[in-house]
Amino acid sequence: MIDGIPSGGRGSLFINGSWRAPASGEYRRVVDPSTGQALGEAPVATSDEARAAVDAAAAVEDRWATVPGHERARLLRALADRLVADHAVMSRLIASEVGKPIVDARVEVDRAIGVYRLAAEEIRQLVGESFPADAYERPAGNESRFLFTVRDPIGVVVAIGPFNFPLNLLSHKIAPALAAGNPVVAKPTSAAPFTALRLAEHFAAVGLPAGVLNVVIGPGGSVGNTLVEHPRTRLVTFTGSTDVGKGIAERAGRGAKRVILEMGGMDPFIVLDDAPLDVVVPAAARGVFSYSGQVCTASKRLLVEESIADRFAHALAERARSLRVGPALDETTEVGPLIDPAAVERMEALVADARSRSADVLAGGTRPTGAGAGSFYAPTVLDHVSEEARVAHDEPFGPIAPILRFRTMDDAVRIANGTPFGLQATVYTRDLARGFRLAKRIRAGGVHLNDPTTLRWDALPFGGVKESGLGREGLRYAMQEMTEVKLISVNFG
C-alpha cells in the first residue's frame, strides 16, 4: 500500500469538515498507470452530496469573508509547512496515481508549497483604488465626496482539477480562492483522488473551519454539473479539455457566473534557421516528452524552417531514442506511462493517421518492449507531417513530436495560428528582432523566446486565448477574478 492511501484502500468524501462514505456505496478503482494494478478505490458522490457540499460552503460564506487577511495567511502558511513535512509521501502518491516520474512529482510538490506561500503574501496586495471625486463635473457636489473601491469575495468557488498535476493545479484554484475570502468545493479527477483527499486532511489539521473547503469526487455529468448549476456557486475554475470547458461555460452562463477556464492547447515550438541546435534539441525534447507530453503547455507542433529541418529532425529522433521509459517510482525514469490504456490507443491512432498522410516515423511509433503492463508509449518523432494530419490539429496529450516544415515567416505564423487554440508558443532564434516580430503575430496567452512552451511562473498571469481558455490563473490574477469590485462613496459635506 502506498503511503497516503487510506487504510483499506477506500477514500471518503470531505463535506462540512467531516469524512463520509458515499451514500450510493459506489466506488471507482484507481489504477497505477505504471503497473496497471489497483491502488485503491475512490468514492463516487451523488448529486445530493454535491449539493450538500455547496450548502456547507454557502453556510460559512459570510463568516469566512470576515476572517482577517492575516489569519487566512497564517492558515495558508501552516498548510505549506505541512506539505513540506509530508513532501516524500505526497511525491510518491502523485507518482503512483498519475504515473509522473518521481523526480517530476517532487517538483510538483515544491511548486504547490510555493503556491500557498505566494497566496498568503498576495492577500496584502488585494487592494482597491481611490479616485479624485472633484475631477468629475457630475453629479453635483463632488467637491465634498471621497471615492474608493474595495474587493469583496465573490462567494462559493467550484474548483475542478485535472489528472496531470493533481496537487499543483488544484492548489492554483484552492489557494487564491481561500486567500480572497471564498469557500471552496473542489472536485478532483476520479483518476487521482487520493492526492486531493490528503490535501484536505492537511487543511483540516491546520484548523481551517468546517465547510470552508469541501472535496467531492464523481462524474462530471452528475456531480460536476450539479456544482456548476447550484444557485449558490458564483465562480467555476476549471482545467481540462476544451469540450468539457465549453459545457461548463454554457451552464455557468445561465446563472451569470464567472468562469476561469484553462483548456486545450496546440502549442507551437518554432525553430528559425539561425537557432543553435545544441540548445534547441534538448529544449524541444523537454517540451514534448516531459511527463509523456501530458501537459497543456507541452510543445504539440514543432515548426522548423526548411533549411535546418533535416538536421533538427534526426537530432531530436536520436534524443528521443535515448530517453529512458519506465515506471514512475524509478529514480532513473525520464518518460513514464500515459494515464490509461485509452491514451495509448489514441497515440497509436494519431501515428497511424500521420503515416497514412506521408509522415516519416524517425523514432518510436510503438509501445516500448519490456516496459511491463503499464500504459507506456515510446517517445515518438514524426517528420514531414502534413497540416491535414490529426496530430497537427488535435491535441495529442502524449509523447509525440510532429515536425511541420515552413519556408517563410508568413508560413510559420499561418501554421502557428491555424488551430482554434492559443495557449503558449515558443520561438528559438539568435535574432531577437525576428523573434519579437513573430511573437507579436502569434495569437497565444504567452510567447517565450528561446525557452520551451512549458515555462510557467506560478505568481504571474497564465491562460490562453481563443478556445484555450477564459480568464487568467496566477495568484494575484486569480484572486482578482475571484473578487468583486465595489465602489464606495463618502459625502463629507
Image (tube, grey):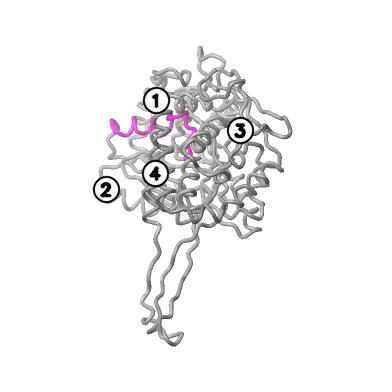
Amino acid type indicated by mark 3: Ser
The span from disc 1 to disc 4 (Cα, nearest Å) is 19 Å
Q: What's the residue type where badge 2 is placed? A: Leu
Q: Residues within 10 Å of mark 4 (few under 14, many from 20)?
A: some
Contact between marks 3 and 1 (CB within 8 A): the answer is no
Asked if the residues shown at circle 3 and circle 2 are in contact, with their CB atoms under 8 angstroms apart, the answer is: no
Location of residue 35 by image quarter: top right
| Sooner in the amino-acid sequence: mark 3 or mark 1 | 1
The disc at residue 432 is 2
Q: Is residue 447 left or right of residue 255?
A: left
Give the magenta range. Answer: 277-296
Q: For the N terminus, which image quadrant? A: top right
Q: Earlier in the sequence, mark 4 or mark 3?
A: 3
The secondary element bearing badge 1 is classed as helix
Q: Nearer the viewer, mark 2 or mark 4?
A: 4
Q: Amino acid at mark 4?
A: Asp
Near-viewer residue (269 or 136)? 136
Gap between marks 1 and 2 measured at Cα: 33 Å
Observer-nearest residue: 284 or 123?
123
**Could you tell me how far apart the alpha carbons at marks 4 and 3 are, in whole angstroms?**
25 Å
Residue 167 in view here: yes
Residue farthest along the right direction in this orientation: 24
Residue 146 coordinates in the image, percent (x, y):
39, 76
Which residue is rendered at x = 48% and y = 67% of the image?
Answer: 486
**In terms of sequence position, does the residue under pointer 3 or pointer 2 come before the other?**
3
- Name the residue carrying label 1: 103
Front tag of 1 and 2: 1
What residue did someone put label 4 on? 458
For the residue carrying disc 3, how many other residues have a C-alpha within 10 Å: few (<14), some (14-19), or many (20+)? many
Q: On screen, 87 above or below 260?
A: above
Q: Residue 102 in the image: state x and y as whole percent.
A: 43, 24
Q: Which mark is residue 190?
A: 3
